[in-house]
Amino acid sequence: MAEVVFKDIVKSFGSFTAVHGLNLTIAEGEFVSLLGPSGCGKTTTLRMLAGLDFPTSGSISIGNRVVNDVAPGERDIAMVFQSYALYPHMTVYDNIAYPLKKRGVRKADRAPMVQKTADLLQLTELLRRKPRQLSGGQQQRVALGRALVRDPKVFLLDEPLSNLDAKLRGYMRVELVELHRRLGRTMVYVTHDQLEAMTMSDRIAVMEGGKLQQFAPPNEVYREPANRFVAGFIGTPAMNLIDGTLANEAGAWRFASPGITLTCPPLTDDAVSGPACLGVRPEDVLLGEGPIRGQVQVVEQTGHENIVVVKIADGIRLTGRAGADHVWRPGETIQCAVDVSKAHVFAAGPSGQRLNRPLTKDQPRLAKEGA
Amino acid sequence: MIRRIAFNLFAWTIVLAVAFPLFWMVLTSLKPQFELFRRPPTFLPETWTVEHYWTLLSSTKFLTYFKNSVILSTTTTLVVVAIATIGAYSLVRFRYRGRESLAFLVLFTYLLPSVVLIIPLYLMLVQLGLSNSILSLVIAYTTFALPYALWLLRSFMAGIPEDLESAALVDGASRLGAFRDVILPQLLPGIISTALFTFILSWNEYLYALVLVNSDSARPLTTGVMNMLVSSFNIEWSLLMAASVMMSVPLIIVFAFLQSYLTRGFGAGGVKG
């Protein structure tokens, strides 16, 4: 069993609290990403799991064993650092063999294990080299090899791909997913890159300000963001978040902001009249027809599609996606609409809760609507 | 092109100006006594001789002083480097109250002139019953070499990424194991510079040796040679120059041996970003 459980974890550095009461259960064999902007507490969380930092309160367990007071080396974990942290004075072979050596594996037994790992990661040719003689991608593989050689219970990865160029990063993403599938080990992956989190994880733990915002599979985080922060953080281009007011008119909730008025999707009982925020993904903005009138401001061509930014009113803009064959010109007047069935409503404030009910598959699609 | 020649000329002028006294020292030590005061002076000796060296080695206490200096400098270097390495590790890696103030307090002791410290230090050593011994000099030298060594090693230590140590800990090393396997090899250039600095400092030290030790059995070279060859009425120039040459030899050897380590093995490339 290698279930990882964080229970009421608080971590303070002096007067600064990096992690506020984190509760998180990572299932055996699961690939979980800790995702969030810089300073959200994700790396601190990982370091506590590794035993390099100690929680101020709360408990961490790995496979039903509370590890708060267990030294890093005895937790049966392996970690890949953002900086790779290869030992510069040792050869690639010695780097990979080091965890074995420290755990008392005999010299003769180490060789085949290192060889096997090197074969797996295509490092065989490089075993006699020193880290500084390797390219970034090769160093990255050595760091991975050092983690893999010992078959630990839990793998911890701290932004392992952030120092690679874009092409190699895409390649390594696939490699890591493949590796996870093959090993079936629990992996905890820290990243600020939502694309990595979305493409690789079984579940994503979105963190902000030291608090867990949402812990759910990638699709759910994307389609059912728990609050305004998650909604804005996940997705490129980002979700349109439009501040306005919510009012109950004869049993139906109406959202209104300059340029847009619409009937909300079904809301929960937490909804109250007053300031609120409408969230619409760019793909749920329909360009070309509809009741919302605006002016095209910017068109970004990505090749397979165009990202169109439309100004609806002062300070209010809608970003929409259009096929690459649609040609919109900046300055052009445009009609558009919002697919209300996929829109979200959030309470006021930077991390306001989502107020609409989860979208279920069998829920009837509501009519396009607008002002 | 002209700028390069001018620059080279300038550099060589400085090198020669610095090196000339050293040449002169070697040449003088190889001239017979009667040639020293000739006018005009001869540049190269007319007759080459090693008799001054022989005299020093066979009929003076030069070798005793030499041995004292070697013991003194080596011990001081070992003590200072050992304490400074551990101290620097603590100052860089651990967080505790007063850490920064402690570091500055240590530096502050280095700012006080030795003359101010020497009398209280002498009295303390007398009361401890350590005066007039090599050990007293080891202690005295440590007091002024350690602060600087600590600061030097601290900056080297701060340059070693913390991730390296974290990686070793996760890989199963104890804190001490990580220190030995990962930190020490990375710190080697720093340790060698510090050792070199401390060794030269204690080898050349004069004031403390003069005040704290006045028996021939414990005297190091600096005060020993002065005491032996310089009196109120006479200075044995030939012997003094020969002694100076022989005093410089160990430093040259140590430097030649260690300077290749100074530039080798800097831990570049292990950590990216």
Image (spheres, coloured by chain):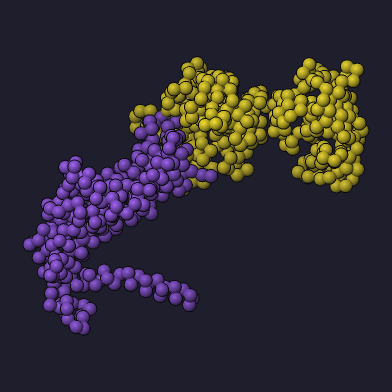
Chain colours: A yellow, B purple
Along the line of sight, which residue is nearer the eye, A102 or A138? A102
Residue furthest to the left in view is B59
Q: In the displayed structure, does residue B88 sit left or right of residue A324?
A: left
Task: Kindly indicate the quadrant of the structure image that contains residue A74.
Answer: top left
Q: Residue at x 80, y 27 (%)?
A: A276
Against A264, residue A162 (above or below) is: below
Q: Residue at x 58, y 22 (%)?
A: A21
Q: In the displayed structure, does residue B115 sit left or right of residue A120?
A: left
> Residue B172's x, y, as percent?
41, 29
> Residue A64's x, y, as percent?
50, 16
> Residue A89's x, y, as percent?
40, 44
Q: Residue at x 74, y 36 (%)?
A: A238
Q: In the displayed structure, does residue B151 sit left or right of residue B44?
A: right
Give the position of the C terminus of chain A as an image quadrant: top right
Against A227, residue B248 (above or below) is: below
Task: Kindly indicate the quadrant of the structure image that contains residue A321.
Answer: top right
Against B26, residue A308 (above or below) is: above
Q: Residue at x 37, y 45 (%)?
A: B106
Along the line of sight, which residue is nearer the eye, A123 or B175? B175
